[in-house]
Image (cartoon, rainbow, N blue to C red):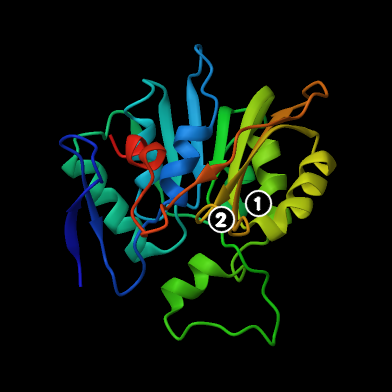
Amino acid sequence: MEVLNDLLGYRNMKIYQNPDWFSFSLDSVLLPNFITIPAKCQNIIDLGTGNLPIPLILSTKTKASITAVEIQKDVYELAKKTCEMNHLEEQITILNDDIKHLKNIYSPDSFDVVLSNPPYFPYHESSNLNDNPHKTIARHEVMITLEELIATGSYLLKNRGYFGIVHRTERLMDIIFLFQKNNIEVKRIQLVYPKVGKESNMVLVEGIKNGNRGLKFLPPIYVHEEDGSYREEILKLFQ
């Protein structure tokens, strides 16, 4: 069932969603607010854009051209409708393609910033997959692995460009290893916690291609108060 929703507290922004497939969540709000966008940034690419939440939020922060890539045809159609609804066709270009094919489309060093909110769970034959194929592709690495994603992102990224990713905290060491393997120096890490006293369940990581050493841990993000309501710092992201 296709529905048209407001994009949180972003004024006059709408987003098409199908709750039977999946809806965008907090991770897609945190990442575009976390990533560094250089002042002279010209080209950004979002790998695995879903129904377009990350490019929508980025469009409020930069005039750079944004490319959004989505492999699922019907989800791509939602993203396209969302783009048209918000009159962002001149800034956002949406591709219905496999991320692994992007090397056949773009030359190396084509983008100043690469972002991704990828599938979180590795795929094994014994994996407990959802009966809904849209949710399976969004959550499990059935179409692309984390290693393939980061290798492609590094190929697309300009020298000294920024790579931002949001993922499960348990995959942090995998991300650090794969960033280094692909010449991306990890520069900033921010842990996200459901609430104070709970373990971190999400992490934001930013690296610079061929960057200098120098890692910073940002202050942690706590999402909920004890009563389950959003904390003030999260509500500010919805403004």
Relative image position of residue 150 (x, y in whole percent): 69, 47
Q: Is residue 172 above or below residue 210?
A: below
At label 1, the amino acid type is: Leu
Q: Nearer the viewer, mark 2 or mark 1?
A: 2
Q: Is residue 188 above or below residue 150?
A: above
At label 2, the amino acid type is: Pro
Q: Residue at x 62, y 58 (%)?
A: 168
**How many C-alpha atoms fall within 10 Å of the one at disc 2: few (<14), some, or many (≥20)?**
many
Relative image position of residue 86 (x, y in whole percent): 19, 38
Q: Residue at x 63, y 62 (%)?
A: 144
Relative image position of residue 131 (x, y in whole percent): 45, 86
Closer to the camera, 12 or 103? 12
Closer to the camera, 69 or 184? 184
Check residue 149 in the rendering and tell me which mark sits there, or answer none. Answer: 1
Q: Quadrant of residue 134?
A: bottom left
Q: Do callouts 2 and 1 mark residues in contact (Cβ within 8 Å)? A: yes
| Element on which disc 2 rests | loop
Q: Which residue is mark 2?
A: 118
In the rendered image, the quadrant that contains the C terminus is: top left
Q: How many marks?
A: 2
